[in-house]
Image: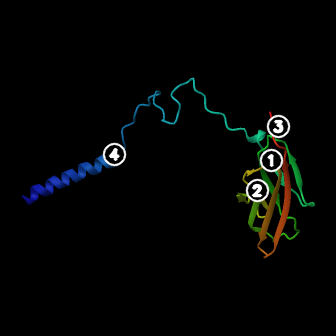
Amino acid sequence: MIVWTFVLVASLGVTITLAVLEPPAARRSDPARRPASVAQNPELEPAAPADRSATAADVELGCGPAAAALMPANVRQIRITGGYCGRNPGRAIVSSAVTNSTNGFIATVFYPSKTGYTTDYISLADGENAIRVEHAFNDGTSERRDVIVSRRPAARR
């Protein structure tokens, strides 16, 4: 009885091992099969990417005196880019805070380099928007800039 059990287990084990190790048979490619995420109707076209150029603008902060910018009524958001204005090559931005104190919007800040930064899109209110940009550096110092971005109110109909 033990011998027959051993023979049965061994033959099943070999068969299963060979089935697992054997590569699957090549499947014939069916051109009608597509992933579910691909549109099945050829009349449908993929959606065009959103064009933010009409409603968003980039503002570059230089090292000059307090900055101010005037935005047309259709611009509802801005992205601020810039760097620090020091001459110390070892100085790097450690943390930043960019806030539109007019509407309370707190921007997310990204660092594409050790000395540069960019924000996500900051929502603007109609009229003047007081934006504060604060940086802390690896040498323990900090820098603060206040920017006024004015957005013309939309025309009333």
Disc number lying in front (3 or 2): 3
Could you say which disc has been placed on residue 126 in the image?
1
Type of residue at label 3?
Ala
Decide which of tag 2 and tag 1 comes sooner along the chain.
Answer: 2
Residue name at image x 63 percent, y 33 percent: 47
Decide which of tag 3 and tag 1 comes sooner along the chain.
Answer: 1
Q: CA distance from mark 2 to mark 1?
A: 23 Å
Type of residue at label 2?
Thr
- Looking at the rendered structure, the secondary structure element under dot 2 is strand
Residue name at image x 81 percent, y 36 percent: 156
Q: Residues within 10 Å of mark 1 (few under 14, many from 20)?
A: some
Q: Residues within 10 Å of mark 3 (few under 14, many from 20)?
A: few
Q: Which residue is mark 4?
A: 22
Disc number lying in front (2 or 1): 1
- Looking at the rendered structure, the secondary structure element under dot 1 is loop
Q: Which residue of the protein is positioned furthest toward the bottom in this rendering? A: 140
Q: Which residue is mark 2?
A: 118
Q: CA distance from mark 2 to mark 4?
A: 53 Å
Q: Of residues 119 and 91, which is closer to you in this image?
A: 119
